[in-house]
Image: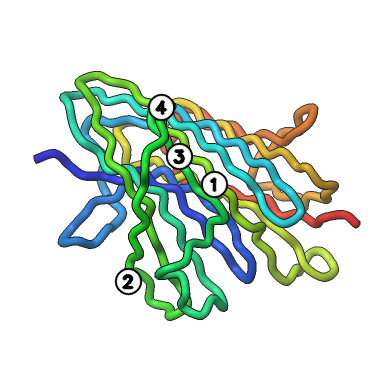
Amino acid sequence: MTKKLLFICIALFLFAVESHSNDSGIRAIGGTWVVMKDEHPTVQMEREKIDMNVYAEYYDVIAEFTFKNNGDACDVYMGFPESGYGDMGGMWDTTSAFLSFSTSVDGVTVTAKREYVKGEFESWDEYRAYWIKQVSFKTGETKKITVKYRSPLGSGISAYYQGSDNFVRYTFSGGNWYGKVLESKLNIYFHIPVEIRPNEKFEIKKELDHYTYYRKNWEAEEYFGVIFKIKE
């Protein structure tokens, strides 16, 4: 029986909105979507390239993923989840946190259906929803999956800066696809003057007009984040 999986990207928010992306698989069990613990037997996420364009009140993300099917033809569910927590009032079962969202397969825009998931978290103020689409692979076929969305900046009380800070985050979680991710590259373009909080955990390199985070031949299981203050 063909395994039904989801390729997912997560938007998390606290007080305002914080955006995450998670390239992991999900399986449908009894009508409930759950994260897989094992690998897909044939479909590999070979590469991912993520561009973040950060503005004063929101940021735009364009995520491009290359998937290759190393086996027989199969159908794969790919989804783009959003999740969140904080003082939201339980309204997110019908209202998305995204300001905009679209996705495409090999350059062709496709429709993704938003499915709200109940009871996945223990806390009353947490929720999760998935934007789900189905993608068919031929034997040995490679496909390019693109996701675009706009999300408000994350924000919270700062223990480092005086007042508050903002943040953008990205959750690498590609470990349950076949094999390893050969290359991951995340680019952050700030279109506002910022002061970035030092973070020894992630080796972020400053390019001419942006910051870059690069990994290769890895499981892609990591919570990446950048915290910053907008300069006046």
Q: Is residue 46 visible?
A: no
Mark closer to the observer (1, 2): 1
Verify CB contact (< 8 Å) between mark 1 and mark 3: no
Mark closer to the observer (4, 1): 1
| Relative to 40, 229 lies left or right | right
| Relative to 14, 28 lies left or right | left
Between the residue at mark 1 and the residue at mark 3, the CA separation in whole angstroms equals 21 Å
| Relative to 232, 218 lies left or right | left
Image position of 41 with respect to 79: above or below: above
Amino acid carrying label 1: it is Tyr
Residue receiving disc 4 = 144
Crowding at mark 3 (Cα within 10 Å: few <14, some 14-19, many 20+) = many
Crowding at mark 2 (Cα within 10 Å: few <14, some 14-19, many 20+) = few
Q: Quadrant of the N terminus?
A: top left
Residue receiving disc 3 = 220
Residue receiving disc 1 = 149
Sequence order check, earlier mark of 4 and 1: 4
Question: Residue 78's x, y, as percent?
Answer: 33, 43
Verify CB contact (< 8 Å) between mark 2 and mark 3: no
Amino acid carrying label 4: it is Lys
User: Which of the labelled discs sits on residue 14, or is there none?
Assistant: none
Residue at 73%, 71% (x, y): give it: 157
Question: Residue 189's x, y, as percent?
Answer: 72, 38
Residue receiving disc 2 = 118
Image position of 66 with respect to 176: above or below: above
Q: Is residue 227 visible?
A: yes
Between the residue at mark 4 and the residue at mark 1, the CA separation in whole angstroms equals 17 Å
Residue at 33%, 59% (x, y): give it: 115
